[in-house]
Amino acid sequence: MSVAISGGSSAAGTALSPKYFEGPVYGKDDVRMHQRYFTYQADAGLVTGKNSNVMFTIDRPAKQVWSYLKDFNLWQNSYGYYYSGVVGDLEGQAFYPTRMHYQVLKVIPEHLITLFQPVPADGSNGGVSPGFHVFMLNEHDGKTGVSVLMSHATQAMGKTEEEALGPWRKQAPESQRFWLEIFIPTLKRLIYESK
């Protein structure tokens, strides 16, 4: 299913008004995940990508959640992701998870981490930033709502819209699986077992 944002047109969108396509949606107990694919036309051609929203609640204050959430190595290593530092301590600096380059744009302790993937200098992503990600904590009545937005994109050289969306659709079930079966349970376990 496609959802055209600009005036109901089925034409390709723009960077500020992409054309969206619905992806997997999950909701059970306190956990919600929604993936949407998008396309838009840039000067250099078709850009395609995926936005993922993940939301869940941890029955602990934000201060306790923050001490674990800010260190992605604690809850993402078991999936094979390794980071060169504690992300929540690196505002204004770069860090390097497996095969990628990120910059930490802003950290507000116990509230926010904002990450940006710069356009690769070698031109390997067609002049498009591979990603922008936000991790937010909101505490209410001693519980913390965690909200994550991840946006990934790439230029789709010489592909039709459907061909370009294919890899995003193919990887969506695995993205859902590692958040629901590995990342969230690991983070919760670490926090609930801590004193």
Image (cartoon, helix red, strand yellow):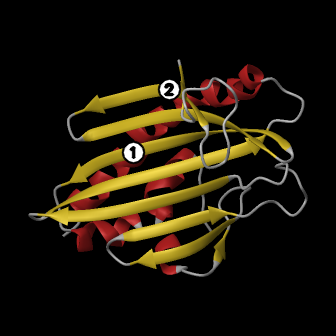
Q: Are marks 2 and 1 in contact (CB under 8 Å)?
A: no
x 72%, y 20%: residue: 162
Residue 188, placed above or below residue 61: above
- Which numbered circle lies on residue 75? none
Q: Earlier in the sequence, mark 2 or mark 1?
A: 2
Q: Which residue is mark 1?
A: 54
Q: Which residue is painted at 82% across and 49% down in the image?
A: 125
Which SS class for mark 2?
strand
Hey, which quadrant is residue 33 in on the image? top left
| 16 with respect to 58 (left or right) | right
Q: Nearer the viewer, residue 177 or 14?
A: 14
| Amino acid, disc 2 | Glu
Q: Residues within 10 Å of mark 1 (few under 14, many from 20)?
A: many
Residue type at the position of mark 1: Val
Which residue is painted at 49% across and 42% down in the image?
A: 52
Which quadrant of the structure image shows residue 62?
Answer: bottom left
**Res. 85 in view:** no
Examine the image and state in which quarter residue 46 appears. Answer: top right
Estimate the spatial distance between the alpha carbons at disc 2 and disc 1, rounded to whole Å. 15 Å
User: Where is residue 190 drawn, in percent x and y?
Assistant: 31, 58
Residue at the far top: name it: 1
Q: Tell me which residue sits at (87%, 64%) in the image.
A: 121
Q: Which mark is residue 22?
A: 2
